[in-house]
Image (spheres, rainbow, N blue to C red):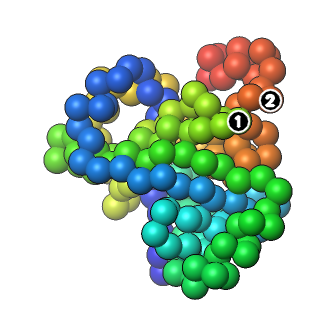
Amino acid sequence: MSLEIERRFLIENDEWKNFITHKTFIEQGYLSYDMDDWIVRIRFNGKNFKIALKKHIKNFTNYEFEYLIPSEDGEKIISNLNKTIKKERFFLKVNKRNWIIDCFKEKNYPLKIAEIELQEEKEEIIIPNFLSKEITGLRIFSNFSLTKYPLSKWKNEDLKNLNKN
């Protein structure tokens, strides 16, 4: 069984750039439309295509099964999607831990989200000073939601409600 346990945060400042080890460009889209069921995602990372099956279990734990697919198939699938997300992904090493920063492009610019994967939900982490609000579990910030309802379409009340949480 493949579990994904992660916490997510908004970015406070650019200090994270001092910890970059490498980066890649990602385009991804979704073949399913119900967030409460299995989500089927396709992702291209500049080298290969992967199909992922994801399902929320509890809190910030999901099932995640990911498989390489032939490039020709991946190109055909992603080119037939109406909406995709594009982002630059930066890999960081901070306090001996691996972090990811996604800098979204196009309709989700200038959104930046940090993620850390954990071994278990109760695992303690040191929050780097370049992070601000934790957004773990806030559906509006899921990649799936950002495909359907990008940051560029958010209304002022969406942003106000975010600051209340």
* Relative image position of residue 150 (x, y in whole percent): 74, 37
What type is the residue that disc 2 sits on? Answer: Lys
Number of marks present in the image shown: 2
At x 60%, y 48%, the residue is 86
| Disc 2 element | helix
Vertical placement of residue 131 versus 84, above or below: above
Front one among 117 and 146: 146
Specify the farthest residue to the bottom.
Answer: 70
Q: Which mark is first along the chain, 1 or 2?
A: 1
Image marks 2 and 1: residues in contact by CB distance under 8 Å: yes
**Residue under label 2:** 153
- In whole angstroms, how far apart are the C-alphas of marks 2 and 1? 8 Å
Q: Is any atom of residue 38 visible in this view? A: no
Q: Image quadrant for the C terminus?
A: top right
**Residue under label 1:** 107
User: Relative to residue 145, is residue 109 drawn left or right?
Assistant: left
